[in-house]
Image: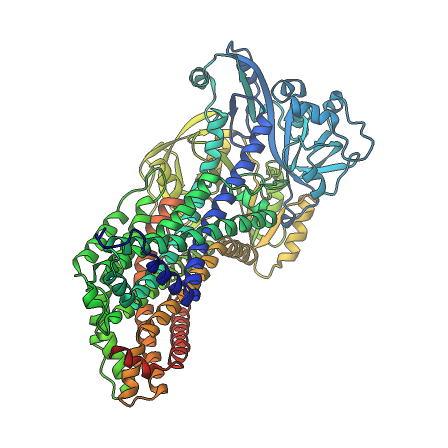
Amino acid sequence: MHPHAPPRFPLARAVFLASWRQTRGRTVLCIVGIALGVALGVAIDIINRAALAEFTRANRALGGSADIEIRTPRGASPPGGGFSEALYPQIARMPQVVTASPVIDAYARVAGQTAEDDPSVRILGIDPFRAARLQPALALGLVAADGGNGDGGGNDTLSLLQTDAIVLHPAAARAFALATGDTLTLQVGSATIALDVIGISAFAPDGGGVMDIAGAQWRLQRLGRLDRIDVQLQDGVDADDFLAAVSPMLPAGVHAATARQSDERAASASRAYRVNLNMLALIALFTGGFVIFSTQALAVVRRRTQFAVLRALGLERGKLVRLLLVEGALIGGLGAVCGVALGFAAAHFGLQIFGDAIVETAGGFARGAEPQARIAPLAAAGFAALGIAVAVFGSLVAALDAGSVRPAVALHAGAEQTMPRRAGAAPGLALLAAGVLAALMPAVQGLPWFGYAAIALILFGAIALLPQIAVRLFDIVPIPSRVEPQLALARLRNASGDAVVSLATLLISFSLIAAMAIMVASFRGSLGEWLAQALPADLYLHAGRGADTVWFDFAQQQRISALPGVAGADFLTVRNLALDPTQPTVALIARDIEPANAGSVIPLRSPALTPPKGATPVWISEAVADLYGHAPGDFIELPIAGRTQRFFVAGVWRDYARQHGAIVVARDVYSRLTGDTRANQAALWLAPGSAAEAVTTGLAEVLGGASFEIRTTAELRARSLALFDRTFTITYVLEAIAIAIGLFGVANGFSAAMLARRREFGVLRHLGMLRRQIIAMLGIESALLAALGAIAGIALGFVISLILIHVVNRQSFHWSMELHLPWLALTALAAALIAAATLTAVITARRAMSSDVINAVREDW
């Protein structure tokens, strides 16, 4: 501290408070920028946690106090699904086991429901006496169930043992308008079965119902099969030791896991989606932080004379820097508090409105889900601290600049229009090189952390190179004849500090907008091309979403192929395989395919290989290749029908329908290995002149009135693209927020620059320029600046989009895509940005020129 300085400096606080009062609008915009970024992060975190908690709660409710879960994917080993019930007594008799509870776990289609009605219902078949040992609350809840009919009588345990008895969850009862005593009609194969609703209980599986296991096996045509065994271990038995002992007893494709491992596997299914949403929120926060940087940088320049006076009166350099950092921290703190509150409100309303869809995205069955918005204190504090840190960092450069200027220099007239000296190109080039290297790095634990780092490094590198780029580009612009554009161009050629800061704000916001637009357009365009190849037929027959009990047998397939108007039919059987118990399941697709014509059936990424003599070929999707490390020419082992089968990888194909992977095998091979000739999907080609309506009528007759989804290619394509657009709604929202934050930054920058240039405007007025000419000059200057920002933003956005497409998307979701540039959208966005920036500058200039700028020159004397 200076020996003559007072211990406190109230004058400095007064100056800062007065500055806040004078620039309330710009301060509020900075707070809004931080608040939006923090709110997005908090809302996404709350929604993700709520969805996973709901999914985990549902799974734990079904498993009760089980220590180990032995299960196979739904429909993994047909016919009948699941695994042989002969495994159950072997497990139950192990000395480490206290209780083993057998379970049927299937999704059945409710007859008469359409696809839009979400026709599937989860059916849990249990041994009530065994299950009561693991889940006492479930047994008591089923006994007490009365369906809300008012008699309160409930049921006895023997009621559930009836072959056709079922207890429904309240959500399922509401969805299908059922009450106790009603009949629930399910579709099994192409026939229907009727179940008696004997009660309604919240202890039934969410959105589903509970039956006795013998009735479920018989009525769902799963005699001799189980889907799961819940195991409770003796006290003192180590779960890992038991897993090691039981694993050799399990057939191929059946896995044992602890409850925690099952939860982690379920969470991993949506982890990439959740992390990418958080990264999008951080991008919005980063943009808000840059608004603070630009605002603080220009505000420091404008207040440079005030700071010089404070320094001359004894304020230390370090204290001035600290005051500016505290100012940034206060802005960040206010924004963080508002952001946490706004994020909680947004998450609460989002869960209320879209709770089912959110839980389904997290990997759970949606109906009846009631996710609750609860703030995780540490996570909320983390986002708030991040918002404050971003604000402080945004103020740091400006604070150091304010402390580095000598008071004697700053007191000279025009000091407020002098920005820090530009650095050379070396730092920017080094950042760009580091970004390129980061983009070439592999994923870390399945997530593209280096991809995110590459985007940040390239953004910072572009900002560092911006002054040099601006000078060189404006130097090649020819000098116009009129005085207004001459002066505007002269100022931009000198790359004046406030112009560079405003340009940087434009560059950041518009490059991120352009990158997201290019990525989404590329994904949507590639999806459209993939649909054109993946949907070559005229009509598609589908068992329905999530239905395990719907299929058409071989006789029905022959009758469908022989229908009048059907020129050809391709039948598919889709099942699930568990290649790795820690990963989500992979789809096995059995369809008519030959190695010679594989490329015409599925969208291969490269020419198919001819399998060696005696080898059986399969074709794996890009996700299987990435997740499990297989490539064309390798051999892969697949668990089919309880045995491990060895196949030759003949090619890799693109599949946008299944994020976690799919494997195509010839249908005759599949039938030979499993003995299963049923199908749950069909593609039909119509004969020339045949009407889809007539064929649909014939299908209804063949299927005996069973409910199947029948759609034309056009309907499936439109539905898929509509689903894509709904999925990417969040990116459109974030683009809108980025545009708003960018315009906030432009408005802030021009407003601060206008105030700092009042003396310049006064001199120009003294030299004979009219007020309208100065406003025109500023409009032209803004238009040129925005045009450069748009051009540079598109170029930078193109580079970032390549990282999003080929690094972030590929490492997150394992989908490749072709580059599609949305020129019309980018041009419209650029034009709107230039128009908005020009209009903002003109309005701000008119307001600044309304004061007596001529008298501002007298302040120099």
Residue 774 seen in the current view:
yes
What colouring style does the render use? rainbow
Residue 736: x and y in percent read 46, 62
Residue 232 vs 423, above or below: the answer is: above
* Picture residue at 35% right of the left edge, 83% below the top: 776
Taking the view exactly as shown, the residue that stands out farthest to the bottom is 768
Residue 229: x and y in percent read 56, 22
Residue 203 vs 537, above or below: the answer is: above
Residue 473 vs 435, above or below: the answer is: below
Q: Quadrant of the C terminus?
A: bottom left
Which residue occupies the foreground of this view, 130 or 586? 130
**In the figure, is residue 235 to the left or right of 295?**
right
Which residue occupies the foreground of this view, 419 or 481? 419
- Where residue 396 sits, quadrant-wise, is bottom left
Residue 604 seen in the current view:
no
Numbered disc total: 0
Taking the view exactly as shown, the residue that stands out farthest to the right is 151
Residue 202: x and y in percent read 68, 33
- Where residue 400 sits, quadrant-wise, is bottom left
- Where residue 132 sits, quadrant-wise, is top right
Residue 451 vs 130, above or below: the answer is: below
* Picture residue at 26% right of the left edge, 82% below the top: 487
Residue 37: x and y in percent read 43, 53
